[in-house]
């Protein structure tokens, strides 16, 4: 009887029909979106995977070394399609840690830039999102001795700022409901690329519905968070209260 049950189980269990092998895909670890001079969307990604293809069609790179790749399209989805044509394996954003938007794009319609990520079943909504003064792709080219992998550096930077109460938690999932809430707006971290080795928090970008409408400095952001009843951190303030202070 047990033998018959075992045979029936083997027949009924078909296994994984939609498996995707790691050797056949390229994982996106961070991404940046910019607008070109002619109004198109440029998407830049940091990926580790099966390698990229050069102009002759040969695969270059290794599966353990990160690569920074850019592509331009008429929409964010189109630019992702163009990126897929530059790598040897399919692109998956399930490991994405950070999504960066240039200030120019943020001052337009931020949801139209993020719609492709919300609709994709393989995108992680836990990724942090931030605005960059100037081209967002510049942040992906920063090289730090502290953390060689730029995706880890950006992710750790934003997580650290959240944990110390300098910025609110700003993941793709957190802002999705606020994008459609007419009574509540949100803020996003505003980063500034100092040079090829440093990125600093400039403050936060203020949003009116789906468009960036202003900004606060880093010090002003701390005071804003102190007014937030949901804030459970203990931010540190350094305020001059008298001219006699040394």
Image (cartoon, grey):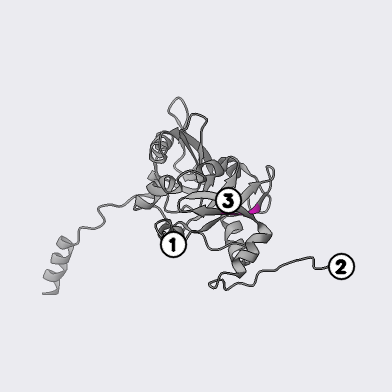
**Of helix, strand and loop, which one carries label 2?**
loop
Judge the density around disc 3: few (<14), some (14-19), many (≥20) Cα neighbours within 10 Å.
Answer: few
N-terminal of the two: label 3 or label 2? 3
**Residue toward you, 205 or 1:** 205
Residue 211 appearing in the image: yes
Position of the C terminus, as image quadrant, is bottom right
Give yes or no for contact between labels 3 and 2 (Cβ–Cβ under 8 Å).
no
Q: Which residue is mark 3?
A: 214
Q: Which residue is mark 2?
A: 245
Q: CA distance from mark 3 to mark 2?
A: 33 Å
N-terminal of the two: label 1 or label 2? 1
Residue 42 pos. (x, y %): 48, 36
Judge the density around disc 1: few (<14), some (14-19), many (≥20) Cα neighbours within 10 Å.
Answer: few
* Residue depicted at x 53% and y 40%: 68
Instruction: Provide the residue span drawn in magenta.
Output: 201-205
Q: CA distance from mark 1 to mark 3?
A: 18 Å
Give yes or no for contact between labels 1 and 3 (Cβ–Cβ under 8 Å).
no
In the image: residue 92, left or right of residue 213: left
Residue 133 pos. (x, y %): 61, 45
Q: Quadrant of residue 179?
A: bottom left
Q: Which mark is residue 183?
A: 1
Q: CA distance from mark 1 to mark 2?
A: 42 Å
N-terminal of the two: label 1 or label 3? 1
Residue 12 pos. (x, y %): 15, 62
Residue 97 pos. (x, y %): 50, 54
- Whether the magenta-drawn stretch holds residue 47 is answered as no
Count how many numbered circles sit on residues in the image. Answer: 3
Note whether 126 is above or below 81 in the view shown: below
**Of helix, strand and loop, which one carries label 3?**
strand
């Amino acid at each position: 009887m047990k033998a018959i049950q075992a045979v029936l189980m083997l027949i009924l269990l078909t296994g994984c029909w939609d498996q995707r092998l790691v050797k056949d895909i390229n994982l996106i670890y961070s991404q940046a979106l910019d607008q070109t001079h002619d109004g198109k969307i440029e998407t830049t990604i940091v990926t580790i995977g099966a390698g990229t293809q050069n102009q002759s069609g040969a695969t270059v790179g290794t599966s353990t070394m990160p690569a920074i790749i850019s592509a331009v399209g008429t929409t964010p989805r189109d630019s992702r399609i163009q990126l897929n044509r530059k790598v040897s394996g399919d692109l998956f954003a399930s490991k994405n840690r950070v999504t960066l938007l240039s200030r120019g794009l943020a001052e337009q319609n931020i949801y139209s830039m993020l719609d492709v990520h919300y609709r994709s079943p393989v995108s992680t909504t836990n990724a942090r999102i931030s605005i960059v003064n100037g081209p967002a792709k510049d942040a992906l080219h920063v090289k730090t001795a502290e953390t060689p992998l730029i995706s880890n550096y950006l992710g750790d930077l934003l997580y650290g700022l959240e944990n110390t109460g300098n910025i609110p938690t700003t993941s793709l999932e957190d802002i999705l409901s606020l994008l459609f809430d007419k009574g509540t707006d949100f803020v996003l971290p505003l980063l500034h690329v100092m040079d090829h080795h440093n990125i600093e928090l400039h403050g936060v970008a203020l949003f009116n519905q789906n468009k960036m409408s202003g900004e606060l400095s880093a010090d002003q952001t701390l005071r804003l968070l102190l007014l937030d009843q949901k804030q459970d951190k203990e931010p540190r303030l350094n305020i001059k209260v008298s001219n006699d202070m040394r």
